[in-house]
Image (cartoon, rainbow, N blue to C red):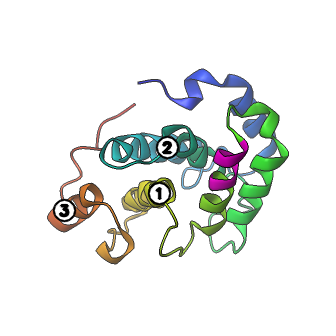
């Protein structure tokens, strides 16, 4: 499996220059890579678009100003993605879904498509990195619900 961080070095370099959270141990590059891994795993079980999911992983937290409460960071990440769309190999339709996924990822409910659901689940499955157990009410797919219900994250607990 090829990950975006391996295939689009120009984007990663741009994010490293522009993102205050790039080196954050909580919301930085390591988290983004984990969200991508989680999302690509989950996309095998629904109709989620792997390209959008991969891009979501890098944009959803990239415009955070801190590691605490940061209202609006998802929307800022969405706008940043649109601003840098020349670096993305996405169609306008995919970019629109990416925008909606990033803008709504914090507290979002009732995702409008499998891709957005997959993005949000991929991020929420990584809450364990900060000692928060995922809450089943925030999950949609059978695969993610099973992991949370059974407290078995072994399918995604592999290092990349």
Picture quarter with the C terminus: top left
Q: Which mark is residue 151?
A: 3
Q: CA distance from mark 3 to mark 1?
A: 16 Å
The residue positioned 53% from the left and 76% from the top of the image is 107
Q: How many marks?
A: 3
Element on which disc 1 rests = helix
Q: Nearer the viewer, residue 110 or 128?
A: 110
- Residue 26, given in percent of the width and then of the height, sits at 54, 55
Along the polypeptide, which appears first: circle 2 or circle 1?
A: 2
The relative height of residue 25 versus residue 75 in the rendered view (above or below) is: above
Q: Nearer the viewer, residue 91 or 82?
A: 91
- Residue 31, given in percent of the width and then of the height, sits at 51, 48
- Residue 130, given in percent of the width and then of the height, sits at 43, 62
Q: CA distance from mark 2 to mark 1?
A: 15 Å
Report the magenta stretch's main SS. Answer: helix
In the picture, measured across the screen, residue 77 lies left or right of residue 147, that is: right
Marks 2, 3: nearer the viewer: 2
- According to the image, label 2 marks what residue? 49
**In this picture, which residue range is highlighted in magenta?**
92-97
- According to the image, label 1 marks what residue? 123
């Amino acid at each position: 499996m090829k990950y975006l961080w391996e295939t689009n070095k120009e984007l990663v370099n741009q994010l490293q220059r522009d993102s205050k959270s790039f080196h954050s141990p909580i919301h930085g590059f390591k988290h983004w890579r984990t969200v991508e891994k989680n999302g690509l795993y989950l996309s095998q079980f629904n109709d989620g678009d792997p390209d959008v999911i991969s891009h979501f992983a890098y944009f959803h937290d990239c415009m955070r100003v801190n590691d605490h409460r940061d209202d609006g960071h998802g929307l800022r990440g969405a706008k940043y993605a649109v601003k840098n769309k020349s670096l993305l190999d996405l169609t306008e339709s995919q970019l629109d879904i990416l925008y909606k996924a990033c803008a709504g990822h914090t507290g979002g409910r009732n995702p409008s498509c499998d891709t957005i659901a997959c993005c949000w689940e991929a991020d929420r499955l990584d809450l364990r990195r900060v000692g928060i157990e995922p809450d089943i009410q925030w999950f949609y797919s059978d695969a993610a619900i099973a992991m949370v219900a059974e407290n078995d994250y072994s399918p995604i607990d592999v290092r990349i």
